[in-house]
Amino acid sequence: MIESKTLTQFIIEEQRKISGATGEFTLLINDIATSCKAISDGVNHGALADVLGSAGSENVQGETQKKMDVLSNDIMLHVNGRNGHVAAMASEEMDEIAQIPDGVEYGKYLLVFDPLDGSSNMDVNVSVGTIFSVLRAPESMSSPTAEDFLQPGTEQVCAGYALYGPSTMMVLTTGNGVNGFTLDQDIGEFILTHPNMQIPEDTQEFAINMSNQRFWEPPVKRYIDECVQGVEGPRGKDFNMRWVASMVAEVHRILTRGGIFMYPIDEKLKSKGQGGKLRLMYEANPMSMIVEQAGGASTTGRERILDLKPEDIHQRVPVVLGSKNEVERVTRYHQE
Ligand code: P6P
C-alpha cells in the first residue's frame, strides 16, 4: 500500500491550494491524527491493557466515565495542546474549556472533541470513535473563554472522526469534500482509501433507537411508521433498520452506503429539560459538516444544524442526518 497517498501527503497537497497558508493547520491535523493513532492503540488492546470498565467518575453530562473515556481525553489534550496550534480546547468529558499549557503560545485554532463517542460499547467490543471539530480562534481573543467557542457550525474549518472498528479509519473534511483514510498498522500511517465520499440521495435504511417510540413527536412517528409499513405502505418500498448506539459507526455506514440517522427531540428528553440527546458542538456540528460535504443533509427536524448559534458548549440538539431526500422528507413532515 506504500504507493498510496498518506494523510500527511494529502493535507500538504490541500495546503498548497490555499494561498498564504502557513502550514499551522496542516500541523494541527497531523497532531489530531497522532492522537487518534494513540487512542486506537488503547482501544485495540481492550482488556489486555486494563482500559475496560468504569473509571469510577462522572463527566459533566452526569454519565459514568469509562477508563478509556478518561485516557482518550488525556491523549487529545496532551498531543494537541503542546505544539502551539490551538489556543484552547473543549471536550465532552470536561465541564470547562481546557487552557493550553503555560509557556505554549496560543495557536490560531480552537479544537472541540468527543474523545470517545459511544464508549458504552467499549465493554462489549463494538465500534467506537473520536469526533473532532476545528474553529478559528476569534481575532479579538486575548485569553480564550467558552464564549469564543460558541460559533455556528458553518464556521468550522475542519471536521472529522476516527472510527475504531474492524479497521481504524479517519474521515476528514476541510470544506472541499470528504475523504477517508485507513490506518496501516504496519507503518503507522493513515492511507487514502476512500477518496471523495458521497452519500446516495435516497436510501432504504433508517437508524433510530426504537425503544423511544412512545415519546416521539407525530412527524417522527409518521415517518418511521411509513418506513415500517414497507412496500404495502405509502413509501412503496421495504426499509431496513440499524442501531449501533455509536454515532461515528452510524455516520460512517451512511457515508459508505446511504441511510438516515435520527435522534429526535422527544417527550422524555423534554421532561428532563434537554434540547436533544446529542451535543451540538462536538457531535452534531462536525458530523453535519461531513454529511453536507458528502452531498447529504442534516437538520434538527426543523432547521439546518450548521446554522444554529450555540448558547453553551455542551448544548444538546435533535439530529436528523443522512441521505438528502429522506432528511428533506422528515423535515417536511415537521413543517406540515
Ligand atoms: P442511546 C453515544 O452515547 C451517543 O452519544 C451516540 O454516539 C449514539 O448515537 C447515541 O448516544 C446512542 O444513544 O440512547 O441509543 O444509548
Image: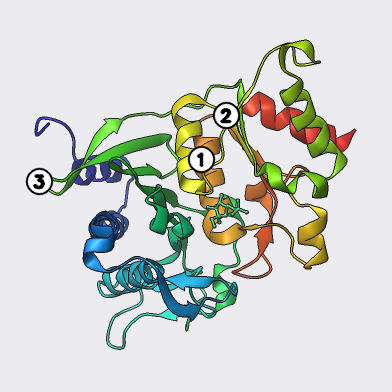
Left or right, 292 with reference to 228: left
Q: Residues within 10 Å of mark 1 (few under 14, many from 20)?
A: many
Q: Nearer the viewer, residue 141 or 320?
A: 320
The answer to whether residue 31 of the structure is visible from this angle is no
Q: Residue furthest right?
A: 336
Q: In the rendered structure, are the residues bearing label 2 and label 1 in contact, judged by CB atoms less than 8 Å apart?
A: yes
Q: Quadrant of the N terminus?
A: top left
Q: State the separation of the CA atoms marked 2 and 1.
A: 9 Å
Q: Residue at x 36, y 69 (%)?
A: 86
- Which residue has dot 2 on it? 259
**For the residue labelled by badge 2, is the local secondary structure a helix, a strand or a loop?**
loop
Residue 222 coordinates in the image, percent (x, y): 83, 31
Q: Is mark 2 within 8 Å of ligand 1?
A: no
**For the residue labelled by badge 1, is the local secondary structure a helix, a strand or a loop?**
helix
Task: Work out whether 71 lies above or below 200.
Answer: below
Q: Residues within 10 Å of mark 3 (few under 14, many from 20)?
A: few
Q: Nearer the viewer, mark 3 or mark 1?
A: 1
- Which residue has dot 1 on it? 250
| Picture quadrant of residue 256 | top left
Query: Callout 3, which amino acid?
Result: Ile
Task: Work out whether 141 lies above or below 269.
Answer: below
Q: Is mark 1 within 8 Å of ligand 1?
A: yes
Q: Residue at x 57, y 76 (%)?
A: 60
Q: Residue at x 54, y 55 (%)?
A: 283
Task: Work out whether 150 lies above or below 22.
Answer: below
Q: In the rendered structure, are the residues bearing label 2 and label 3 in contact, judged by CB atoms less than 8 Å apart?
A: no
Left or right, 148 with reference to 238: left
Q: Quadrant of the C terminus?
A: top right
- Which residue has dot 3 on it? 187
The answer to whether residue 319 of the structure is visible from this angle is yes
**For the residue labelled by badge 3, is the local secondary structure a helix, a strand or a loop?**
loop
